[in-house]
Image (cartoon, coloured by chain):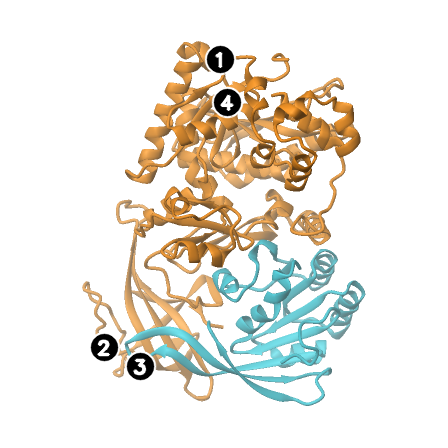
């Protein structure tokens, strides 16, 4: 699905839509299994059990809660980029293009991979960060659950891949467990 | 010679990781005779039933499954091993206040005082056997767990004696000054099995024709050092029945014990642990300035009511400040769990009682700590200084039925992250009554209040027999209306009904909903009803 076959150092990936968190967890899982550390900055309410089910190696995951102010957020992300290979961020409101550029310069210099989760204000994040790859997800079908019977066993997700590094925008259908 | 090594008793439960996994499963109502614990796709421990069917330590997963198809395979979980072993340590600590737990499954204690108290080494061995048997019996709910008690000069001999006692079923006491003779006839492979000497080194010894420890003991240390480096000297000491590292010969650094006294009793574990980390940092720097690192640490905790808890912790590579703070947390958690604490902590003391010369750590090529782990550890330290310990956290498995309870986040400053990176945090054990997999990827810390209504707009209620009053049709969440497309449940959840202050009674449901105006996007929610109110606790995001 990735134009280069996987997560690439120095690049920015944005996961958006209604399966954004699950998609982001899938994107980073292979890297953490291979020994990379994952810093999760400011992502609220992430399901740790789900992360483990998506294959994220939890022994190399650190949750960081940045201070609320904008300048602090940028310096926190910079400090996280110093120590961790993969960063997963939820971008707070009010981040300007200048802030985004500072973060991305840092990411490129230190050869990290940046995964953004855009759930609420996706278009704003998209214009500020101009991600290399955008994965917009939409759940089309839930499996296993009926009217009063069964339980959620999985889902079909449509992923629209676009972005600066993607020559042709494409649609993919995926089956997610979770 | 005997003056150099202390006389110790060892209580050892072989294959503790597998036994712990088995007891843990048993406590959840899943009974398996054959259990194996896997780490990095290899068996690291298995229960006696699995061993009888031919499962060996070091086997690959598929091979082990083929050998014993009805075996349960559990993931390696050091936290579980430690928690399950705690009752045994606690029982032994009733007799001997100061015990050392170097790894789960093995308790080491100095025999000088206790032996005099109970009347000799043999009597002590009997007492330890009785105590351990009672504790294990309670833990395994009637099943027999193999264990052994050994007393000898030096740790290695005592450990080997304990392991042989485990297979015989009676304690084994090796008389003073007889350790060396006892070891001399043993094959060199025990160095790899019990003393963490590299298997390649042991294999080389065998190829050099040094089959027994006696052969090594006869060689001059200088020759072994010339051939093997520092390990040569260590092996020679071990073969002669001495402790691995010679007692440090430089003068001990002044003010070795670090004591911290709180002005008011502290009841918050985190406060104690974080203060301990600062104190430990000073201690580590202080020792480092004198060229030493601490391999054995005595932690003493005191409460306002005069209760005291002492424990010794051992790590052959040396304890870092974070590792020391982690040990304080383990000790305090265990103490609280055993209900030995009735008031806040007023004082703790960290005394390094075993030191070794500090040497740089060699990074391994495979499967060992990597540079990435070291970088991450440094970044964690820096972020903790920037944002405070509560803002930088790592997940730890706790277990539970509620999706928010399964993992807890602990402050990363008090976790030895580099060691942790080599283990597995996650576990495949699921509690009965937990949400079925897949788990929701968004779990709210603060559940959102929600209205679940039937076709007539009335609140959907659940009867005492867990029956819905009507089919759920509409959900109102944050002033948006959603249509219910499908639902599952209600599943009753009743927890801790024996404890009035902590009991919970609720029902859980899964709902698939779509927005009224945009029917194309659907979302799946987990809702609970507790105290007559519906809450969204999680979402499949």
The residue where tag 3 is placed is B473
| Disc number lying in front (2 or 1) | 1
B534 or B404: nearer the viewer: B404
Residue B261 picture location, percent across and down: 58, 26
Q: Colour of chain B?
A: orange
How much space separates mark 4 and mark 3, taking CA atoms? 65 Å
Element type at mark 2: loop
Say yes or no: labels 3 and 1 on the same chain: yes
The chain shown in cyan is which?
A
Q: Which mark is residue B113?
A: 1
Image vertical order of residue B538 relative to residue B37, above or below: below
Image quadrant assignment for residue B485:
bottom left
How much space separates mark 4 and mark 1, taking CA atoms? 10 Å
Q: Which mark is residue B470?
A: 2
Q: Residue furthest front?
A: B209
Is the residue marked by circle 1 packed among few (<14), some (14-19), or many (20+) residues within 10 Å? Answer: few
The residue where tag 4 is placed is B109
B541 or A120: nearer the viewer: B541
Residue B58 picture location, percent across and down: 53, 48
């Amino acid at each position: 699905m990735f134009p280069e076959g996987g997560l690439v150092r120095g690049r920015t990936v944005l996961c958006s839509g209604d399966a954004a968190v699950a998609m982001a967890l899938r994107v980073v899982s292979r890297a953490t299994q291979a020994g990379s550390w994952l810093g999760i900055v400011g992502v609220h309410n992430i399901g740790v059990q789900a992360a483990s089910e998506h294959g994220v190696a939890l022994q190399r995951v650190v949750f960081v809660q940045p201070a609320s102010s904008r300048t602090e957020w940028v310096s926190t992300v910079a400090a996280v980029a110093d120590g961790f290979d993969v960063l997963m961020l939820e971008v707070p409101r009010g981040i300007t293009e200048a802030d985004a550029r500072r973060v991305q310069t840092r990411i490129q210099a230190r050869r990290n991979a940046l995964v953004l989760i855009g759930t609420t204000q996706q278009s704003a994040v998209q214009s500020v960060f101009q991600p290399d790859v955008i994965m917009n997800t939409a759940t089309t079908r839930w499996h296993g659950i009926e009217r009063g019977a069964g339980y959620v066993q999985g889902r079909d997700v449509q992923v629209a891949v676009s972005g600066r590094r993607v020559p042709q925008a494409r649609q993919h259908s995926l089956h997610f467990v979770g | 010679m005997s003056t150099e090594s202390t006389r110790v008793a060892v209580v050892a439960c072989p294959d503790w990781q597998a036994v712990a996994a088995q007891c843990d499963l048993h406590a959840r109502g899943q009974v398996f005779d054959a259990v194996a614990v896997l780490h990095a796709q290899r068996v690291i421990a298995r229960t006696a039933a699995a061993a009888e069917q031919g499962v060996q330590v070091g086997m690959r997963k598929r091979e082990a499954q083929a050998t014993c198809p009805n075996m349960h395979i559990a993931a390696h979980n050091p936290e579980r091993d430690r928690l399950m072993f705690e009752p045994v340590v606690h029982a032994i600590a009733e007799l001997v206040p100061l015990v050392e737990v170097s790894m789960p499954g093995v308790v080491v204690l100095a025999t000088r005082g206790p032996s005099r108290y109970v009347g000799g080494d043999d009597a002590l061995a009997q007492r330890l056997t009785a105590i351990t048997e009672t504790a294990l019996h309670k833990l395994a709910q009637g099943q027999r767990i193999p264990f052994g008690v050994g007393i000898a000069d030096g740790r290695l001999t005592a450990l080997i004696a304990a392991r042989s006692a485990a297979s015989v079923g009676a304690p084994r006491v090796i008389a003073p000054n007889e350790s060396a003779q006892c070891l001399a006839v043993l094959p060199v492979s025990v160095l790899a099995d019990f003393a963490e000497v590299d298997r390649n080194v042991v294999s080389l010894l065998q190829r050099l024709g040094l089959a027994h420890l006696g052969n090594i003991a006869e060689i001059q240390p200088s020759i072994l050092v010339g051939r093997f480096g520092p390990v040569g000297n260590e092996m020679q000491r071990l073969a002669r029945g001495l402790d691995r590292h010679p007692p440090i010969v430089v003068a001990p650094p002044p003010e070795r014990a670090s004591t911290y006294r709180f002005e008011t009793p502290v009841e918050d574990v985190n406060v104690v642990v974080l203060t301990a980390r600062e104190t430990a940092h000073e201690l580590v720097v202080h020792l480092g300035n004198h060229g030493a690192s601490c391999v054995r640490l005595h932690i003493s905790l005191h409460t306002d009511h005069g209760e005291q808890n002492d424990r010794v912790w051992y790590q052959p590579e040396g304890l870092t400040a974070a590792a020391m703070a982690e040990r304080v947390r383990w000790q305090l958690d265990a103490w609280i769990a055993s209900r030995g604490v009735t008031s806040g902590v007023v004082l703790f003391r960290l005394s390094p009682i075993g030191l070794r010369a500090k040497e740089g750590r060699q990074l391994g090529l495979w499967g060992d700590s990597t540079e990435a782990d070291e970088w991450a550890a440094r970044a964690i330290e820096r972020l903790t200084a920037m944002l405070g310990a509560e803002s930088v956290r790592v997940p730890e498995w706790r277990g539970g039925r509620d999706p928010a309870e399964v993992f807890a986040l602990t402050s990363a400053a008090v976790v030895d992250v580099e060691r942790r990176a080599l283990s597995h945090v996650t576990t495949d054990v699921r509690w009965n009554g937990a949400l079925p997999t897949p788990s929701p990827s968004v779990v709210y810390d603060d559940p959102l209040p929600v209205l679940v209504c039937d076709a007539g707009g009335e609140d959907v209620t659940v009867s005492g027999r867990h029956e819905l009053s009507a089919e759920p049709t509409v959900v109102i969440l944050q002033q948006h209306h959603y249509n219910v497309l499908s639902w599952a449940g209600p599943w009753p959840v009743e927890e801790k009904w024996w404890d009035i202050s902590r009991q919970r009674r609720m029902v859980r449901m899964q709902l698939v909903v779509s927005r009224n105006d945009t029917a194309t996007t659907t979302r799946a929610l987990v809702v609970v009803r507790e105290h007559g109110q519906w809450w969204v606790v999680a979402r499949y995001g």
